Image (cartoon, rainbow, N blue to C red):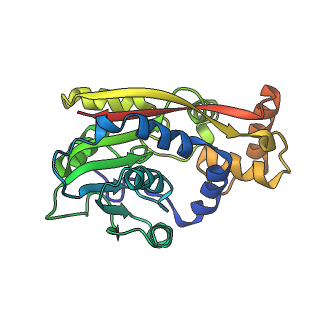
Amino acid sequence: MEKKSVYERKEREEDIYSFWLRNANERQVLEKALDDRFREWYKKTDSSPLRIIDMGCGRGSAAIKLLNILKRRGISYQYTGIDPSPNQISMFKVNMRGRPNVRAYCSTLEEFTSKDSFDIAFVVHSLYYVQNMTESLKQILALSKNAIIVHHGERGINEVHKRFKPHVRKGPHIISTHEDVTKALDKLEIRYAKRVYPTKTKTASCNDPKNSEGRNMIKFFLEQPTLPESTIEQVSKYFAKRKLDYLTHDMGLIITK
């Protein structure tokens, strides 16, 4: 695989990512789904801490949801986050202040080594950038007993990607869905359970190409921190024509067995 392929988010993309976080309810849906499916991914039979590795931890917005569940259930943990972006790792550390047994490393999956083994790999929207999804999943599951994987569905961001494919950030799996993940798992003969959850993202601001919130949301959808005015106007017309205040976005949640 190409070096720095897993969750390689450029520094300048962090601002547009924050716009999505405050306009989307996916993180809340994820927390509820993980809580509901707790017995599918928590399989420890002893009292030792749950060892988690977060592949592409970013600023920790997904990690916080998982740790909320463990805190409510009184479960101890050792949490390791890795991400190739120094700025993301810095933000992760800030967001994890006051949470015990959390460590973070600026590293790619390919570069990361550990003498420890892990109970769970947390892989949230991290597989869009790998060169070979099958090999990446093989490597991830070599580090951990099981994996929790979150990936786009057919509805939502994937629709925007397909509609404006020439303008979307280039990458081998940027335009992909959870079906691509399960095909790779099938190839590896890894058993899993998958459910798809509808989430909502506020998109009314995208109807106006002059709206700063909408402009940044459009940049997030295309994964491009800078876009020509003509492209922003084109995408804005697409949203305005649909007359939607919210975009329904499918979140595929896969838990290996």
Q: Judge whether residue 18 can be spotted in this image.
A: yes
Tell me: residue 128, above or below residue 8.
Answer: above
The count of marks equals 0
**Within the image, what quadrant is residue 98 found in?**
bottom left
The residue lying toward the viewer, choosing from 28 and 35, is 35
Residue 18: x percent and y percent? 62, 57
157 lies left or right of 183 = right
Residue 228 seen in render: no
Q: Give the x, y percent position of residue 175.
A: 50, 36
Quadrant of the drawing holding the C terminus: top left
Name which residue lies at 78% across and 50% down. Answer: 229
Most foreground residue, 6 or 229: 6
Q: Is residue 222 left or right of residue 147?
A: right
Image height of 82 relative to 255, above or below: below
Residue 253 screen position, x and y as percent: 41, 34
Give me the residue at 58% from left, 27% from top: 155
Q: Which residue occupies the foreground of this view, 15 or 103? A: 103
How far from the left and from the top, in percent, is residue 88?
Answer: 48, 66
